[in-house]
Image (spheres, rainbow, N blue to C red):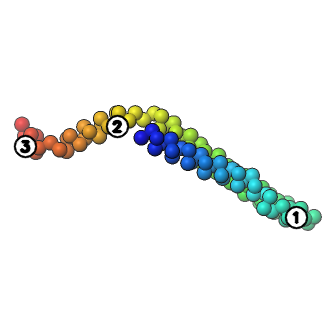
Amino acid sequence: MRSFFALLSVLTCVLGLIMIVRGCDHPNKYQKELSKANTTAVRVTQIYAEATHIVVVGIGIICLGILTASIGRLIYTEEIKNYYSSIIKIFKKNPNDLDE
């Protein structure tokens, strides 16, 4: 169970890092447009706002991965196994045993 949460956390953090790298590289896609002499302030602001948004989403995804890892560390697999086995025992009981 912990390995599942660890794997999920790693995959989430890698996805967040990819988003951050894409956000940092976003203004380079528009370098030709940004280097023009008549580029408007609105266009420049839009490009950097998009880049900031992508980076912030990446940071949020990494925070979600850290939260997943923390939840995985808090879960005790033995307690979960005992809980599920007790529930299964209740449903596997003979209906005649309940009358006694």
Query: Which residue is labeled 1 in the image?
Result: 39
Q: Quadrant of residue 26 in the image?
A: bottom right
Q: Could you say where residue 24 lies in the image, as x and y percent from the top left?
A: 75, 52
Q: Quadrant of residue 67 in the image?
A: top right
Query: Which residue is labeled 2 in the image?
Result: 80
Q: Mark 1 and 2 residues: CB-CB less than 8 Å, in contact?
A: no
Total number of numbered labels? 3
What is the three-letter code of the residue carrying label 1?
Thr
What is the three-letter code of the residue carrying label 3?
Asn
What is the three-letter code of the residue carrying label 2?
Ile
Q: Secondary structure at mark 3?
A: helix
Mark nearest the camera among 3 and 1 is: 3
Q: Residue at x 78, y 62 (%)?
A: 29
Q: Could you say where residue 76 lies in the image, as x and y percent from the top left?
A: 40, 33
Q: Secondary structure at mark 1?
A: loop
Find residue 11 and name its label. none
First in residue order: circle 1 vs circle 2:
1
Query: Which residue is labeled 3 in the image?
Result: 96
The foreground one among 100 and 93 is 93
Q: Residue at x 10, y 40 (%)?
A: 98
Q: On the picture, is 94 further left or further right than 25?
A: left
First in residue order: circle 3 vs circle 1:
1
Local packing at callout 1 (Cα closer than 10 Å; few below 14, some 14-19, many 20+) is few
| Quarter of the image with the C terminus in it | top left
